[in-house]
Amino acid sequence: MALTVGVIGAGQLARMMIPAAVNLGIDLRVLAEADGMSAELAAVRVGDYRDLPTVLAFAKTVDVITFDHEHVPQQILRELVREGVTVHPGPDALLYAQDKLLMREKLAELGLPVPDWARITEPSGLADFLQQHGGRAVVKTARGGYDGKGVRVVSHEHDVDDWFQALAEDGNDGALLVEELVHFSRELAQVVARRPSGEIAVWPVVETVQKGGVCAEVIAPAPQSAGRLADVATDIAVAVAEGIGVTGVLAVELFQTTDERLLINELAMRPHNSGHWSIDGSTTSQFEQHLRAVLDLPLGATGARDPWTVMVNIFGGPASGSLGDRYGAALAQHPHVKVHNYGKASRPGRKVGHVTAGGDDLDEVVYQARATAQIFQD
Ligand code: ADP
C-alpha cells in the first residue's frame, strides 16, 4: 500500500500533519518555500511552488500531492494531473478555494445559501450595489486574500479605487466581489472530510470568534447548535464537498444571521484553524483525517472526547519572545491544557501557536484556554 504523502507548503498546517503521519507510518514529505519553516521536522525539500519543474520533481517522489495552502497556480496543478500525479484536492475543486468570485458563482449554481453578491469591474458597479443594499457592503479581492486582508467594508463607490487600480495595472481583466454586509449573530464553521471514493466524515459544527478579521477562538461544538442548526450546517458542507468534488478536509465558514439563516462565507480545502480543536478534542484529528482522505483510506470517527473543547490562538507580540520561555508558568498553572507551538518566529499579530482545553463546564474550559494563551502573550 502506497503511503507517501507530499505536502506543498510548510506552514503550521503541514507541521501538524507530522504527528499523525508518524503514528500511521505515513512518509510525509514537504515542499517548503524556504529554510526554517514551521514543518521542517518532516523530510523537506526547498523549492518554489510556482515553478513547474520543481513541483514535478517533488511530486515524482510521492504517491499523492496535497497542500498546506491554496496558492499553487492552476496551470501547475493541471500539468501535474496531466503527468499522472495524484492530486487531492484536485484542481477542479481547488479552483473554488482560490477565487472567491468563482466560489460564489459555483455555490449559487449549486443552490446553496450565500450572501447577495455581484461581480464588479468599476466604481459604478459598486455604486449600483450600494444603492440596492442600504448604502453599505463588503468588497473582497477575488484572489490572494487571507486573515481579513482583501476584505473591506465600504459605503462609497470610490472606497476600493486602489483595488480597481491594482487590477488594471496587472493588465488583468479581473473583477472584485461585492457582497451584502451580513448581519450575523455569530460565525460558525463546519469541517468535513471526503475520500475520493466518496465516504464523508463530519465533525461537530463549531463557533469561531474573529478579532480584526482573524480567527481568535473556537468552541466545539457551537453552543446551542444541537438539532436543526447542526443538521443544516452538515447538509450545507456535505453538499459543497459533493457538489464541488472536494477530497481531503474541507472547512465551510458560515454566518448565522440575526434572522437565523446560515449563509456560506468562505471555503478552505485543507485543514483549517476552525478544526485545530480536533487534535486534542476529537477521536480523529483533522490532520490525521486529511492524510487518510487523500490516501483514500477509511475515515476515522469524528466524535468529541469532551462535552466542550475550546481552542484559543496564540498571537506573536512585541513582548512574547519564544513561547518556550513561558512554559514554566503555563504548564504549571494549567496542567490540563494542551499547548501547540508552531516553531515560528514571533511577529506582532502572527499566529505562532494555539492552546486547547476540554471538559464539561464551558465557562471553566473557556477560562482555562484563555488564561493559558494569555500567559504567552503578556
Ligand atoms: P479571509 O479570506 O481573509 O479570511 P473572509 O471572506 O473570511 O476573508 O472575511 C474575513 C471576515 O470578515 C469574516 O470572518 C467576517 O467576520 C467578515 N466578513 C466577511 N464577509 C462579510 C460579509 N459579507 N458581511 C459581514 N462580515 C463579513
Image: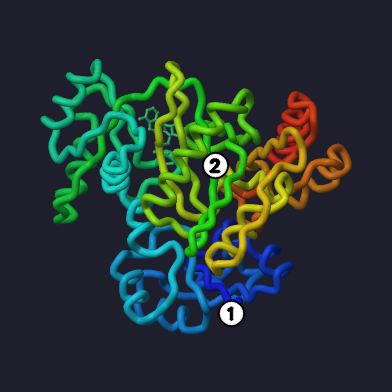
Task: Give the distance between the C-alpha atoms of the residues marked 1 and 2, in whole angstroms.
Answer: 40 Å
Give the residue pinned by disc 2. 349
Reply above or below: 274 against 57: above
Horizontal and vertical percent for residue 237?
47, 43
- Tell me which residue sits at (54%, 27%) in the image: 228
Residue 248 in percent (x, y) is at 51, 59
Q: Nearer the viewer, residue 159 or 19?
A: 19
Q: Residues within 10 Å of mark 1 (few under 14, many from 20)?
A: few
Q: How many marks?
A: 2
Nearer to the camera, 76 or 250:
250
Neighbour class for label 2 at 10 Å: few (<14), some, many (≥20)? few
The residue identified by callout 1 is 2
Amino acid bearing label 1: Ala
- Looking at the rendered structure, the secondary structure element under dot 1 is loop
> Looking at the picture, which amino acid does disc 2 mark?
Gly
Question: Ligand 1 closer than 8 Å to the CB at disc 2?
Answer: no
Residue at the left extreme? 124
Q: Earlier in the sequence, mark 1 or mark 2?
A: 1
Residue 225: % across, % down: 59, 27
Q: Quadrant of ligand 1?
A: top left
